[in-house]
Amino acid sequence: MLDNRLQTFLTLCETKNYSLTAKTLNMTQPAVSQHIQYLERHYQTNLISQKGKNFALTEEGKALQQYVMTLKANSERIKPLLQQIKSNSKKLNFGATLTIGEYTVPPILANIFAEKPDLQISMVVENTMVLQRLLWDGEIDFALLEGHFKQEEFESKLVSNESFIGVCSPQNEYAERLINMEELLEQNLILREPGSGTRDVLERALYNQNLSIRDFKRRIEIGNMNAIKNLCHENVGITFMYKEAAKKELLEGHLKEISIRNFNITHPFSFVYLKNCPDKNQIEYWYNKIMVIRNT
């Protein structure tokens, strides 16, 4: 359980307002101030540099926020871990982003099921932002992420480096020739929703070429990868995705990789978990297990 003064501090970091913190925690505003003052005395440093509309933490305050977030997240994990021991149950709860969840994980799970038939497995498929929040809430053991994440907040290990490519219909005018990225701006761009790892990688790649998704003629946002691929096959537009996700369609000729000058993007798939987690050895066991299965 988290000390109530540390909980007050975390809430204040989130709300950036003493009155709202008091209301959220059903406290008085003076009590909130007393909790912060206690922490500053205890740690012998200032935590808040500015109050009011321009609320800001000191560098020490930012560090404490990070430490307490990790402490809270790990404390949330202790209860289910103890319950598993009590009930003698074997569970694995993890999350994966869409590409990894649909195309990378299934053969791994098939291998694990065959080896451990009594293991209860729960996989959440969500975007990178949601999975990071689930890690902080202690609801999943680890996450397999394809997008950019806050590396300073988590432990992580490399699973693989994956190619990120543009794809289109075989009937698309750009299917068979080498082009510049600017030539694609007249195409409809079909892409994932904000917060997805695939979209994040695309936006950063475009930024490096002084472009953005807003430069495309039209943008179509769809949260389902198969729907995106089907629309590309019908020549409704183009998209960008990991080659792993389009491997089957590329082999069968339903989609074509777009050859783009100066667009050689690879991005890591990462195994991500909480720092200093109480079951670190068990979580790292699963990382090693995944890597052994992938390499066989």
Image: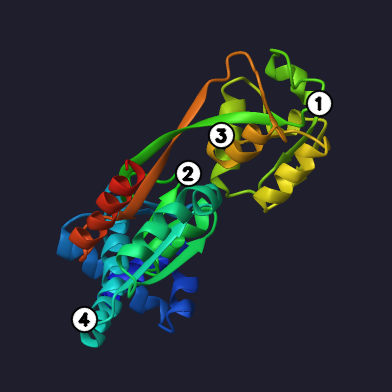
Going by the numbered disc 3, the residue's amino acid type is Lys
According to the picture, the residue beneath numbered tag 4 turns out to be 85
For label 1, the crowd category at 10 Å Cα-Cα, with few meaning under 14, some 14 to 19 and many 20 or more, is: many
> In this rendering, would 254 be left or right of 137?
right
Q: How many marks?
A: 4
Considering only vertical position in the picture, is 239 above or below 154? above
How far is disc 1 from disc 3 in space, using C-alphas?
18 Å
Q: Position of residue 145 (x, y in %)?
A: 44, 48
> In this rendering, would 222 be left or right of 263?
right
Going by the numbered disc 4, the residue's amino acid type is Ile
Pointers 1 and 2 in contact (C-beta within 8 Å): no
According to the picture, the residue beneath numbered tag 2 turns out to be 146
Considering only vertical position in the picture, is 189 above or below 17? above
| Label 1 vs 3, first from the N-terminus | 1
Pair 3/2: label in front: 3
| Label 4 vs 3, first from the N-terminus | 4
Task: Describe the element under mark 2 as helix, strand or loop.
Answer: loop
How far is disc 2 from disc 4 in space, using C-alphas?
32 Å
Considering only vertical position in the picture, is 270 above or below 76? above
Task: Describe the element under mark 3 as helix, strand or loop.
Answer: helix
Q: Position of residue 29 (x, y in %)?
A: 41, 77
According to the picture, the residue beneath numbered tag 1 turns out to be 172
According to the picture, the residue beneath numbered tag 3 turns out to be 243
- Specify the quadrant of the image occupied by residue 65: bottom left
How far is disc 3 from disc 2 in space, using C-alphas?
12 Å
What residue appears at the point 77 percent right and 24 percent down from the top-left corner? 185
How far is disc 4 from disc 3 in space, using C-alphas?
41 Å
43 or 251: nearer the viewer: 251
Pointers 4 and 3 in contact (C-beta within 8 Å): no
| Label 3 vs 2, first from the N-terminus | 2
Q: Position of residue 66 (x, y in %)?
A: 31, 55
